[in-house]
Every structure is written in C-alpha cells, then in structure tokens.
Image (spheres, helix red, strand yellow):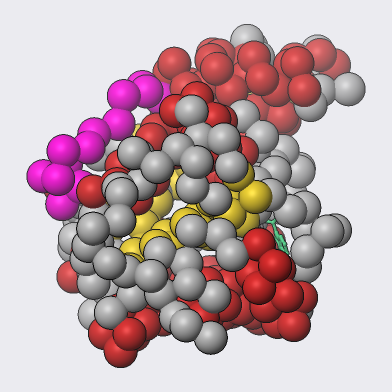
Amino acid sequence: MSGANNDATSPSFLSDKLAKIFVAGHRGLVGSAIVRKLLALGFTNLVLRTHAELDLTRQADVESFFAAEKPRFVILAAAKVGGIHANNTYPADFIAVNLQIQTNVIDAAYRFGVKKLLFLGSSCIYPKFAPQPIPENALLTGPLEPTNEWYAIAKIAGIKMCQAYRIQYNWDAISGMPTNLYGPHDNFHPENSHVLPAMMRRFHEAKVKGAEEVVVWGTGSPLREFLHVDDLADGVVFMMESYSGLEHVNVGSGKEVTIKELAELVKEVVGFEGRLVWDSTKPDGTPRKLMDSSKLAGLGWTPKISLKDGLVDTYSWYLENVKQ
Ligand SMILES: NC(=O)C1=CN([C@@H]2O[C@H](COP(=O)(O)OP(=O)(O)OC[C@H]3O[C@@H](n4cnc5c(N)ncnc54)[C@H](OP(=O)(O)O)[C@@H]3O)[C@@H](O)[C@H]2O)C=CC1
Ligand SMILES: C[C@H]1O[C@H](OP(=O)(O)OP(=O)(O)OC[C@H]2O[C@@H](n3cnc4c(=O)[nH]c(N)nc43)[C@H](O)[C@@H]2O)[C@@H](O)[C@@H](O)C1=O
C-alpha cells in the first residue's frame, strides 16, 4: 500500500470538483449539511454509504471499501453522538464506537492514498474548567467534564491520531472542533438528543396539546455556544481548502447564551405560551464552554447565521420533516 498522495503540485480542494470525496455519516446533522454544501459548490463525485451499507466499526469492511473506492478526500462526520443524558448513560458505547470508527477510517484513508482527511471532534475535549473563551492550547491541561469524558477521550485520541500520522508520514490529516451544533437533520429524540432539538420538540408537543408547563433539565444556568450546521459545513470546506496544520482548530459562533435564555428563545420561535419547570435532579454538565475561534477567524473564516434565524430555520424543517 502506498500511503498518501501529498504532492504540492496537485490541485486545491475547491478547484478539483471531480475529485472523489467520502463524506462519512452523510445522513446525520453534520454530514448532511456538508453534502448540501459540496453539491451547491458543484462537486459531482461524492461517495456515500449508509451505516447499514458500511459499518465503520468493522475494520475489514472499511479497508475493502477504501481499496475499492480510493477516495481522494475524506470528511469524517460519522460518530456515536448524543446529548448529556446519552453520554452519561452509555459511556462504553461512546468510547468504544468512536475509537473504532475513527481508528478504522483514519488508518485506511492514509494507507489507501487519500490526499487529505478532516476529522471532527467536539468542544467537550477541553477541561471542565478551561479558561474562557477556550483556546486550542487548553487541550489536556485539566480534568474533563465527567458526563462526557468517555466521548471526549475518544475525540482527543482522534486529534492525536491525525497529528501522529502527519508527523510520521507527512500526511495531511486535520481536525476541526465544533461547538454545540443544531439545524436540519438534527436528532429530536426526547432523551438522547442535545438540548436545542429536545426543547424544540417538547415545546412543540406541549403547544399542540395545550399543556400549561414543560419540564426542562438542570438549573438553566450553564452557558453554551451554538453554531448552525450550515455555518459549520461552510467552515469545513474552508478548512479543507485553507488549513493544513498540526493543531486542531476551534469552530464556534463566538456567542453564548444561558440554557434559560435558550429556552426562552426556543419557546418564542415555537410559540409555546406555558411555563418552564426546571428539573434540577438532571445534570447541568460543564458550566461554560465558549470556544476561542480566533485562529479560524485569522485564517479568514467567520460564521453568518444568527441563533434566532437558525432557530426559525430549524423549526420550519422540524415542522416539515419530524412532527407527527
Ligand atoms: N451535534 C453536535 O452538537 C456536535 C457534533 N460534533 C461532531 O460532528 C460529527 C457528526 O455529528 P452529528 O452529525 O451531530 O451526529 P449524527 O448522529 O447526526 O450523525 C452521525 C452519523 O454517523 C453515522 N454512524 C454512526 N455510527 C456509524 C457506524 N458504525 N458506521 C457508519 N456510520 C455510522 C450515523 O448513521 P446512523 O444514524 O445510521 O447510525 C449518522 O449518519 C461527530 O463527529 C460529532 O462528534 C461536534 C460538536 C457538536
Ligand atoms: C455537543 C456536546 O453535547 C453534550 O454536552 P452538553 O453541551 O452538556 O449537551 P446537551 O445539549 O445535552 O445539554 C446542554 C445543557 O442543556 C440542559 N438541558 C435542559 N433541558 C435539556 C433537555 O431536554 N435535553 C438535553 N439534552 N439537555 C437539556 C442540560 O442539562 C445541559 O446543561 C456532550 O455530552 C457532548 O456530546 C458534546 O460534545
């Protein structure tokens, strides 16, 4: 096996619209947004496999796939993903499945000649009490948030694997660390989803039933930073074109809200007029995780979609695609 094709004379990502690109996880929140973006840009040779067609935890199947398809670029958006409750309840799945998927895909991509790979991590890689806004170099400077440390450890291993392959093989593997994401094709599961789709669904169902109150989790005081997934997809394309460094890169909106403020915004967009009841037996998770995304801004990329506009867009997608 040859390893990576990394010659400096080959065309850039954006100028090679016929290049074969494997978007892993293309039916998920992130993967589907990346596919929409690539198609809008005129890419015509996307290789896509559903989980049922190719289980990325199976090393032999992943190797056969890469041997047969030989993609030129890989964007790794397949993972075991969930909100605070899912992370806290299924630690074995979150560490094992993610380590398996990323190890299989990153290693096979290198060995079967992929030119460039982008791995997606998450802001939960940083210590629970990291300085705010969190710079990239806060990685591995303190203990993790316990509700998602298993997932975080897998994601940190993914960053380190990309770095190791770059150092040992001079292979162009990069890592992007998105903040909390939302948008079309999100997971609206009542317990296992992230906060924003969970609230949207619960408030919508309460509005339809005429309920007077809705229960939301924790104290409402934690701060979170939200980025619309279409902005992330734009940032991913930007990094594929413009970034080839050892260090991972934060991708955030730079704007944070308390969970209470988020609840009020979602309530307004959905049109639920009842009361919110906070269930403080549920975990708050990390108190604050605003990322410092100045590195990406310095390279020339910033997000465009406000939280309010993004919520309106997501709710209209929910009404058309999810509600019963
Ligand atoms: N959502 C968020 O707020 C954030 C997400 N991220 C990162 O972005 C990436 C994508 O997340 P997101 O789009 O939200 O997740 P989703 O759960 O929406 O999508 C994940 C995708 O991966 C696929 N997948 C999971 N397991 C396997 C497997 N064994 N073999 C093949 N495919 C598999 C899923 O298919 P299926 O559903 O059929 O199993 C699904 O299409 C992840 O790396 C995540 O860590 C980072 C920060 C925040
Ligand atoms: C992206 C990120 O996502 C996860 O971390 P998280 O940010 O804590 O995720 P969350 O969206 O689930 O919760 C955010 C806050 O919101 C509160 N909250 C209120 N009501 C509901 C509610 O109904 N559901 C959920 N899920 N949370 C609720 C909840 O108590 C918490 O204070 C990581 O595990 C990890 O996977 C990761 O990287």
Q: Magenta part of the protein: which range? A: 295-307
Say whether residue 233 is left or right of residue 126. right
Q: Quadrant of residue 268?
A: top right
Q: Quadrant of residue 61?
A: bottom right
Mark yes or no: residue 5 visible: yes
Mark yes or no: residue 291 visible: no
Depth check, front residue: 116 or 18: 18
Q: Position of residue 201 (x, y in %)?
A: 71, 29
Q: Position of residue 202 (x, y in %)?
A: 72, 30
Q: Position of residue 112 (x, y in %)?
A: 54, 75
Residue occupying image coordinates x 48% and y 72%? 113
Residue 300 belongs to magenta span: yes
Query: Does 259 sit above or below residue 7?
Result: above
Say whether residue 74 is left or right of residue 221. right
Residue occupying image coordinates x 47% and y 67%? 114
Q: Residue furthest right?
A: 324
Q: Position of residue 32 (x, y in %)?
A: 61, 38
Query: Does 84 sit above or below residue 236?
Result: below
Query: Does 21 sit above or below residue 15?
Result: below
Residue 265 belongs to magenta span: no
Depth check, front residue: 113 or 311: 113
